[in-house]
Image (cartoon, grey):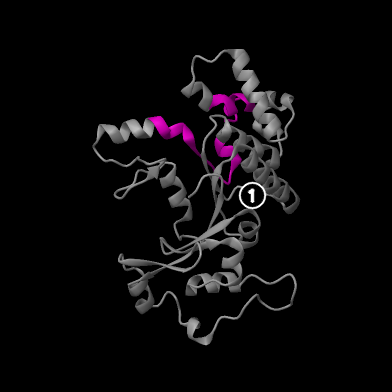
Amino acid sequence: MAENEIVGLVGESGSGKSTLGRLLTYLIKPDQGEILFAGQNLNQRGLEQGQRNLRQQRRNFQIVFQDPDSALDPRWEVGRSVLEGLLVFEPGLTKAAQSKRLNELLDLVALPHLIAHKYPHQLSGGQKQRLAIARALILKPKFLVLDEVASALDMSIQAQILNLLRAIQQELKLSILFISHDLAVIEYISQRVAVMWQGKLVEMGPSKILAKAPYHPYTRRLFSAVPSLKTKTKRFKVQPEELTPLNSPQTLTQLASSDYLKREIAPDHFVFLPK
């Protein structure tokens, strides 16, 4: 991912989207491979340098989950929950500095300062999601994973949260991985889209291009299910030869191959296929 961009991550349930988000924020420790952040490998197993890199970079990547209640302790005022990460990484910060930072974050997510003294059960779902976002931003991260953050909200609140996220991303120059099953939301908020299937990345490209001209058979099936707002028909038709079950033994055996070829079929549009 590049700096200052939003990449959408889509795929069916069980494709590995949330697992990837947890791996990238090191909530799950990888068994193998590399996780590179700002040129540093965070997964140097058994090496002191790897642990040092992880400690140095930990505050620079954060994650927000679908359920905001998981980020807000029901026994605490929400202001304390928002400040928790700051108190861990900057324990010597004065009360005045803490209060100033908290108010800045509440302004950023368009919430009144007095809400900091309320408890989670006193707030709406939209307010709690804004606070979960503020909590993730308290350490001024460079990379943010948003895992289905709008899917549990009603449509009007969902639109507010999406517009808020776009404004925050532009103001703070964040890199965001936006995970969702909602293709319309992904197309709206993302500059680029990555598609996962069976635990593997199969296609990646600009959101507008991928929505109109997907290449991989799974991506074509995924986007063909989205109706067009301008016509009564689907955006494009899936050809008969593409109707072979993707979960057939032959297809799964071929696509499960670890020997993948990354092919650029258009500028910044990549597809990953077995060699």
- Hey, which residue is sitting farthest bottom in the picture? 240
For the point 73% across and 53% down, which residue is it? 155
Q: Which residue occupies the foreground of this view, 256 or 123?
A: 256
Instruction: Indicate the secondary structure of the residue bearing disc 1.
Output: loop
**Relative to 22, does residue 272 appear above or below in the rendering?**
below
Q: Which residue occupies the foreground of this view, 195 or 31?
A: 195
Residue type beneath disc 1: Ala
Expressed as whole percent of the image width and height from the top left, the position of residue 119 reads 66, 28
Please say whether residue 72 is visible from this viewpoint: no
| Residue tagged 1 | 150
Answer left or right for 148 relative to 123: left
Q: Exactly how many numbered labels are in the figure?
A: 1
The magenta stretch is 56-84
Answer left or right for 202 relative to 44: right
For the point 62% across and 42% down, which residue is it? 169
Q: Is residue 89 magenta?
A: no
Expressed as whole percent of the image width and height from the top left, the position of residue 186 reads 61, 57
Expressed as whole percent of the image width and height from the top left, the position of residue 86 reads 53, 24
Q: Mark 1 packing: few (<14 Cα in 10 Å), some, or many (20+)?
A: many
